[in-house]
């Protein structure tokens, strides 16, 4: 069964919107696991929904593609509080080593 062109267009739009959250988190150096653990995953799920419903798609893309380092999310972002909570959680938790743990027997 083939989907009509309009369905593929909508699928691509949803996929691009969903990627914005990942890209903003990367730009802000937010650990995805830290984000997923907040409020037992509910905060992350709400942040995804916020991105999917966001009216600032074009402004977000410009911000993501910008070359200037940013300390925090853009002021227009509906997930600003979520990102701040992620940063706070990261700062409060012990840093994970970039090297994998080796367990001695």
Image: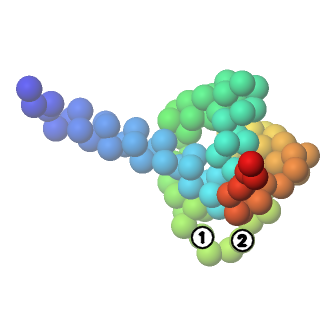
Residue 38 in sight here: yes
Q: Residue 88: where, in percent of width, then height? A: 87, 45
Question: Which residue in the protein does label 2 denote?
Answer: 69
Residue 66: give its label. Answer: 1
Question: Residue at horizontal 23%, vertical 32%?
Answer: 7
From this viewpoint, which residue is outermost toward the right?
92
Q: Secondary structure at mark 1?
A: loop
Q: Residue 3: where, in percent of width, then height? A: 15, 30
Closer to us: 62 or 19: 19
Q: Secondary structure at mark 2?
A: loop
26 in relation to 105, above or below? below
Question: Residue at horizontal 57%, vertical 35%?
Answer: 48
Residue 75: give its label. Answer: none
Left or right, 13 with respect to 83, comes to left
Mark 2 residue crowding within 10 angstroms, few (<14) / some (14–19) / many (20+): few
Left or right, 55 with respect to 29, comes to left
Residue 28 in sight here: no
How far, Cα to Cα, is label 2 from label 1? 8 Å
**Residue 69: quadrant of the picture:** bottom right
Q: Are marks 2 and 1 in contact (CB under 8 Å)?
A: no
């Amino acid at each position: 069964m083939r989907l009509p062109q309009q369905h593929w267009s909508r699928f691509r739009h949803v996929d691009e919107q969903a990627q914005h959250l990942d890209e903003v988190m990367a730009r802000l150096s937010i650990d995805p696991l830290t984000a997923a653990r907040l409020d037992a995953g509910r905060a992350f799920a709400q942040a995804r929904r916020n991105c999917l419903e966001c009216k600032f798609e074009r402004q977000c893309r410009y911000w993501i593609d910008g070359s200037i380092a940013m300390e925090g999310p853009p002021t227009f972002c509906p997930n600003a509080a979520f990102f701040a909570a992620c940063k706070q959680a990261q700062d409060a938790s012990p840093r994970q080593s970039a090297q994998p743990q080796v367990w001695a027997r």
